Image (spheres, helix red, strand yellow):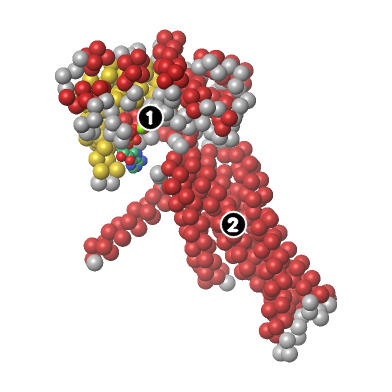
């Protein structure tokens, strides 16, 4: 289980998270929605210790991430795959090398690594792209490689940062299917950050809205669709104020 | 006024603290021998190849100019073999290391800052961390070690080139014989001239790459931020090279 407890984070004088609390249950896919710049990525980065809270804490399976030493942090990160917004692939490496990079940090045999890379690329329907460079791929394909890189590590959790943003509707639907497939095949718990409501309804078991630094409302997809909260309503209906 | 000075002081202390922290992380990263040695070789090749043409070009012309200026200055006052002395001493002690250092600050420093800056703003640095790599041992250490070792080598080749063109200029443009030029080179030569210049160059290489890494990894704000970091790395490393140059002269000469 991942739990945010009263998280506060600001940059300089600007507060971003002000008392952010949320639980991610094992086995579910939780979607965090919110306006651009509301701090969704900031929240996600606290889970893997890329950012340190000013106050409050993030607990991953009983471990408070910010208080871990390097070895402890590496342990936590082993359990978590992170899919970055623009995939964050390494330009100078081929697709296969990108997917294998995290595996090389573990005591795995070369053929085990090759097998896992093949498997992960197959799961995102990118079999045969091993030797391509990221620059030769479309935005959607790059994001799929990003997912493959996370899956290859066989994590318990996968964090997706805006997996469908900037993609055409069909490619977005493909991404949704991949996220669902990752959960069904691998049983991973997912946290998806997005402002794409169609995607949120498709992949989410529960949806939480981040607004002005904290969770405005959290509930099942059906509950959010029927919300009475004017702020949430406005966001999910995409009405200008 | 006082509060401005106060906040400036706090800023400087903070920056120094961050720098100390960074160097501490770097020292710790040396233990990760599975990662950095292999990558260091790649960086050494890159920095060497990147630097050699510009360094040799600068050194070649510096050698010629030094010979001509020495002859202009000393003709009719001291024996002209002093041209060899001036070319040798100046190339080794000062112009070889410093001109090369400044030029490489512009080339190597800028490219390191741009590369790491791009990796930072596209979250590749974050991705490395989540894949259990330490950016200090994966990105910084290889570049800093490569800079510290390759820059003196490049400078040494530059000095050799400068001496060669200085000698050729003396033969062709001045009426100096090879024997006289060599006599001038040996006159007043101390082994310290050589190691001082090369030691200085190593500290310049260290500074150029470290500044490039620090500035690159602190990049924020997209392509524009990368541009700002690149300029900043060049300016900072040029200033630090000049300060270091004076510092070593005071300490070691
Ligand atoms: N490392 C950082 N340094 C300073 N400000 C940051 C940093 N990361 C994010 N921010 C700021 O925090 C706010 C929230 O950013 P982010 O979490 O990326 O929003 P989003 O909800 O769109 O993902 C933004 O205003 C952003 O500029
Ligand atoms: Mg974001």
Query: Which residue is labeled 2 in the image?
Result: B104
Q: Determine the residue located farthest toward the front in the rendered image.
A: A240
> Which one is in front, B20 or A161?
A161
Question: Could you tell me which secondary element the residue under label 1 belongs to?
Answer: loop
Location of residue A30 (image quadrant):
top left
> Which one is in front, A58 or B164?
B164
Q: Is residue A125 placed above or below B214 in the rendered structure? A: above
Q: Residue A48 carries which label?
A: 1
Q: Is residue B13 placed above or below A162 in the rendered structure? A: below
Location of residue B162 in the rendering, given as x and y in whole percent from the top left corner: 71, 66
Q: Which residue is drawn at 53% across and 33% down?
A: A90
Q: Residue at x 40, y 24 (%)?
A: A164
Q: Is residue A140 placed above or below B204 in the rendered structure? A: above
Quarter of the figure that contains the N terminus of chain A:
top left
Q: Determine the residue located farthest toward the top in the rendered image.
A: A184
Q: Is residue B20 placed above or below B239 in the rendered structure? A: above
Cβ at disc 1 under 8 Å from ligand 1? no
> Which one is in front, B103 or A113?
B103
Residue A63 makes an appearance in the image: no
Location of residue A12 in the rendering, given as x and y in whole percent from the top left corner: 28, 46
Q: Which mark is residue B3?
A: none
């Amino acid at each position: 289980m991942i739990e945010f407890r009263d998280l506060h984070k600001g940059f300089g004088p600007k507060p971003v998270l002000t008392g952010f609390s949320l639980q991610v249950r094992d086995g579910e896919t939780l979607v965090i929605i919110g306006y651009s710049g509301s701090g969704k990525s900031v929240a996600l980065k606290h889970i893997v210790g890329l950012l340190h809270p000013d106050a409050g804490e993030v607990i991953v399976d009983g471990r408070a991430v910010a208080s871990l030493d390097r070895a402890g942090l590496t342990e936590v990160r082993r359990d978590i795959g992170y899919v970055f917004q623009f995939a964050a692939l390494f330009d100078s490496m081929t697709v296969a090398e990108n997917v294998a990079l995290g595996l090389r940090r573990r005591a795995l045999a070369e053929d085990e690594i090759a097998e896992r890379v093949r498997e992960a690329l197959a799961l995102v329907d990118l079999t045969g792209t091993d030797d391509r460079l990221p620059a030769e791929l479309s935005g959607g394909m790059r994001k799929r490689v990003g997912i493959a890189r996370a899956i290859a590590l066989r994590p318990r959790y996968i964090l997706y940062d805006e997996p469908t943003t900037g993609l055409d509707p069909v490619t977005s639907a493909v991404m949704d299917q991949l996220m669902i497939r990752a959960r069904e095949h691998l049983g991973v718990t997912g946290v998806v950050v997005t402002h794409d409501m169609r995607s949120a309804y498709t992949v989410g078991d529960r949806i939480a809205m981040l607004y002005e630094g904290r969770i405005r409302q959290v509930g099942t997809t059906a509950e959010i669709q029927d919300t009475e909260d004017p702020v949430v309503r406005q966001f999910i209906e995409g009405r200008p104020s | 006024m006082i509060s401005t000075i106060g906040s400036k002081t706090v800023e400087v202390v903070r920056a120094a603290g961050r720098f100390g922290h960074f160097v501490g992380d770097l020292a710790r990263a040396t233990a990760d021998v599975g990662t950095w040695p292999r990558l260091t070789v790649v960086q050494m090749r890159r920095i060497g190849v990147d630097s050699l043409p510009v360094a040799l070009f600068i050194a070649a012309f510096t050698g010629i100019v030094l010979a001509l200026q020495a002859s202009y200055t000393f003709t009719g006052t001291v024996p002209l073999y002093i041209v060899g002395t001036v070319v040798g001493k100046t190339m080794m002690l000062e112009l070889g290391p410093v001109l090369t250092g400044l030029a490489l600050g512009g080339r190597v420093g800028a490219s390191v800052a741009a590369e790491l800056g791009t990796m930072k703003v596209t979250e590749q640095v974050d991705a490395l961390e989540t894949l259990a790599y330490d950016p200090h041992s994966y990105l910084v250490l290889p570049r800093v070690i490569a800079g510290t070792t390759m820059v003196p080598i490049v400078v040494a080749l530059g000095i050799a080139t400068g001496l060669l063109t200085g000698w050729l200029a003396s033969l062709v443009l001045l009426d100096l014989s090879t024997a006289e030029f060599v006599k001038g080179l040996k006159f007043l030569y101390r082994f310290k001239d050589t190691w001082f210049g090369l030691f200085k160059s190593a500290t310049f290489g260290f500074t150029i790459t470290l500044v490039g890494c620090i500035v690159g990894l602190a990049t924020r704000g997209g392509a524009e931020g990368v541009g700002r970091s690149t300029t900043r790395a060049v300016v900072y490393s040029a200033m630090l090279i000049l300060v270091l140059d004076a510092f070593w002269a005071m300490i070691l000469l």
